[in-house]
Amino acid sequence: MENSAPVPGPRIAWTTLLVLLAAEALGGLVLVVSAIGGLVAASAEPLGQRLSVFLALVIGWLWVCATLAGALRSRAPWSRGSAITIHVLLFAAGTGILQLSLADPRLGWVLVLMSLAGFFAALLAKPSPR
């Protein structure tokens, strides 16, 4: 006998993924706004180098926002793949912070834990049928 009740696992995974992507988008916005000040203040470094780092930050933030929008709007299958990729890169950033002492180790651990939670939430979330 088949049970037609919805399984709560994918719904919890989507909710977890949406919360993490929203937190990452908000954190990215904070970084973009603070980087604008750094872009102007760091006059000793070449302008091209400052602009390239700033543009990479903006493009990454827009990518997270686009993934969040796709996940919110329609739970599109591409948003799962995008979220997996984002969280693999976030894991690399977190472990880089921990290994190279680039920032406070707590930030590295937060990034690693968020990346693992987001990765597994994206794996468990099922796309909505078309």
Image (spheres, rainbow, N blue to C red):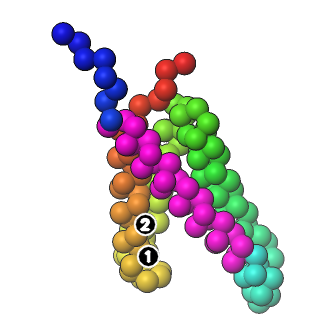
Q: Position of residue 5 (x, y in %)?
A: 31, 23
Q: Is residue 47 above or below residue 64?
A: below
Q: Would residue 59 be visible to someone looking at this image?
A: yes
Q: Quadrant of residue 70?
A: top right
* In the image, residue 21 lies in the stretch drawn in magenta: yes
Q: Is residue 67 above or below residue 39?
A: above
Residue visible at 55% across and 40% down in the picture: 71
* Mark 2 surroundings: few (<14), some (14-19) or many (≥20) residues within 10 A: many
Disc 1 marks which amino acid? Answer: Leu
* Mark 1 surroundings: few (<14), some (14-19) or many (≥20) residues within 10 A: some
Residue visible at 41% across and 31% down in the picture: 126
Q: Quadrant of the N terminus?
A: top left
* In the image, residue 14 lies in the stretch drawn in magenta: yes
Nearest to the observer: residue 103 or residue 107: 107
Disc 1, SS: helix
Contact? badges 2 and 1 (CB < 8 Å)? yes
Q: Position of residue 73 (x, y in %)?
A: 61, 36
Q: Quadrant of residue 121?
A: top left
Answer left or right for 47 relative to 72: right
Disc 2, SS: helix
Check the image and name the residue furthest to the front. Answer: 5
Q: Which residue is mark 2?
A: 111
Q: Is residue 6 above or below residue 91?
A: above
Q: Would residue 56 be visible to someone looking at this image?
A: no
Residue visible at 40% across and 70% down in the picture: 110
Secondary structure mainly formed by the magenta segment: helix
- Write the start and end of the magenta stretch as one range: 9-35
